[in-house]
Image (cartoon, rainbow, N blue to C red):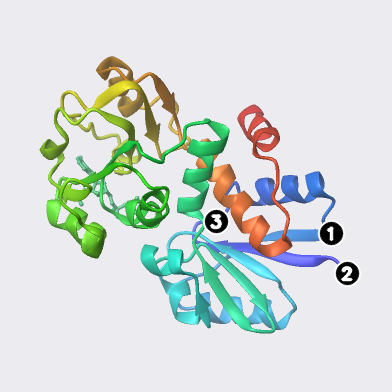
Amino acid sequence: MTDRYAIIGNPVAQSKSPILQMAFARQLGQDMSYETILATADTFHETVRRFIREGGKGMNVTAPFKLDALDLVDTLSDRARAAQAVNTLKFGDAGVYGDNTDGAGLVNDIQERLGFPLKGRRLLIIGAGGATRGIFLPLLETGPAYFLVVNRTDCKARAIVGDHAAPGKVEAGPIRLAEGGRFDVVINATSVSLTGDRLPLPEGIFAEGSLAYELAYNKGHTAFMEDATQGGAARISDGLGMLVSQAAEGFLLWRGVRPDISETMELLRNK
Ligand code: ATR
């Protein structure tokens, strides 16, 4: 029997998840369907419950329900707890399992697709919103030599780093703290590329051979990517690989097999 999956959000029509998940299913010969479900704050819980009653096996959760989804899970992964957000639900005999695959998607994209090992590197995240909450712990677990999170509102960066703070190893603060820090990887996790604002980058943040990673994936060559090139970053990436990799991580959770990323990225870029 065909296994049913879906993405739930509002809006949801723009989501790339149906294309990605069905591309993975074709690639790996999996008998599954994938629907797009629009919900409102009032109908979110009941819509998920109905999907489960109808035999649904799993769901992706997108904005604005990633927090609401926390309330309906029976078991939460550590990474979803750290992110305080759920983007993947799996339904089974043990109830509802909630996970967050964003951070693993980013880590896999940087280490595997881009071939850039993070262990022993100097990492910088600019921004301390929901995106940073999702990626902080998985990045920390790769074992960087030094990890700094900076934000315009510095207390939000400190709150994310929280108990993991260790002087000279894991730190948080205002954006200017990054100045002269010569990082191997600099991640733009602010929303400036979406809003069209400009983020003045501190001087001297790019080490030799460094990677600048833009989390946005559908904004072309952003001001951050441009400024990073000017600032000396050796490599630049947008977030398309993270998008595909976080979807692949969800597929792995549901189906137990890991899709090939590169093939699917080609498909998306050509669309
Ligand atoms: P998301 O869930 O996409 O991370 P968010 O939670 O609204 O969105 O967070 C947006 C992030 O972009 C925040 O870190 C925000 O900084 P503040 O916490 O100080 O608001 C950052 N941001 C947005 N506009 C910015 C700007 N013009 N300059 C610097 N940082 C900006």
Relative to 35, is 217 on the left or the right?
left
Q: Is mark 1 within 8 Å of ligand 1?
A: no
Q: Residue at x 84, y 65 (%)?
A: 2
- Tell me if residue 5 comes above or below residue 118 in the rendering: below
Nearer to me, 246 or 124: 124
Amino acid under disc 2: Met
Q: Residue at x 71, y 73 (%)?
A: 56
> Disc 1 to disc 2, how far (Cα)?
7 Å
Label 3 CA crowd tier, 10 Å (few <14, some 14–19, many 20+): some
Label 1 CA crowd tier, 10 Å (few <14, some 14–19, many 20+): few
Q: Which residue is mark 1?
A: 31
- Tell me if residue 220 comes above or below residue 71 in the rendering: above
Question: In what element is the residue under mark 1?
Answer: loop
Which quadrant of the rendered structure holds the C terminus? top right
Q: Which mark is residue 12?
A: 3
Amino acid under disc 3: Val
Looking at this view, name the residue that lies furthest to the right.
Answer: 1
Amino acid under disc 1: Asp
Which tag is nearer the camera, tag 3 or tag 2?
A: 2
Residue 133: quarter of image: bottom left
Task: Check if mark 3's residue and mark 2's residue have beta carbons within 8 Å.
Answer: no
* Percent of width and height locating residue 187: 34, 38
